Amino acid sequence: MRAITRIIIHCSATKENETYSIEQLKRDHLSRGFSDIGYHFYITREGMILSCRPLIKIGAHCKGFNSDSIGVCYEGGLDVYGKLKDTRTPLQKEALKGVVRDLKDIYPAINEVKGHRDYSPDLNEDGKITSNEWMKGCPGFNVETEL
C-alpha cells in the first residue's frame, strides 16, 4: 500500500447555480487524458460522498503531490458570475469533515490537510502561500483553519 501523508481539498469550479455530475466529471477528466477521475472522492451538493479513484491508486489532482495524497473534491466553488466563492452547502461541509476525519483514522500518517491553492509556488519565498501567489483559488475557503 502507498504511504498517505496528506489530503488535498478541491472544488469542481462549477457555478453555484449549475450542477456538475460525476458523469460530467469523468468525461472531463478523460478528455484531459486521465485514465479515470483524478480525485479519490467527490462530494455532491446534497452531501453524497462518491468514491472515484481507488485509494490504492495514485490520484491525478495536484501535480507534484499526488503520490502521497488523497484528493477530495466538492461540487461547486464559483458564484453565478464565475468568481471564486465558498459555495459549500451545510451537507457538503458535514460530509467533507466526515471524510477527512475517517481518512485520518484509516491513515494515521496523514499530517497535512490543505487546499489545492496551498500547493502553489511560494513566489516571494517567505514561507507562506498568499492569494497573490495562487495558481488556482480552489477550493474557495481556507482548509487549514476550517478542517
Image: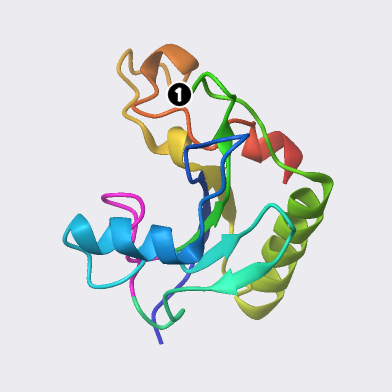
Expressed as whole percent of the image width and height from the top left, the position of residue 96 reads 70, 56
Depth check: give the residue in front, 139 or 23.
Answer: 23
Quick check: is 50 in the magenta stretch?
Answer: no
Residue at horizontal 69%, vertical 52%? 45
As drawn, 51 above or below 92? below
As drawn, 27 above or below 88? below
* Type of secondary structure dominating the magenta stretch: loop
Image quarter for residue 30? bottom left
The magenta segment: 58-68
The quadrant of the image that shows the N terminus is bottom left
Identified by mark 1, the residue type is: Ile
Expressed as whole percent of the image width and height from the top left, the position of residue 146 reads 74, 39
Q: Residue furthest bottom?
A: 1
Q: Residue furthest front?
A: 18
Residue at horizontal 81%, vertical 55%? 94
Q: Which residue is mark 1?
A: 129
Quick check: is 65 in the magenta stretch?
Answer: yes
Expressed as whole percent of the image width and height from the top left, the position of residue 47 reads 74, 60
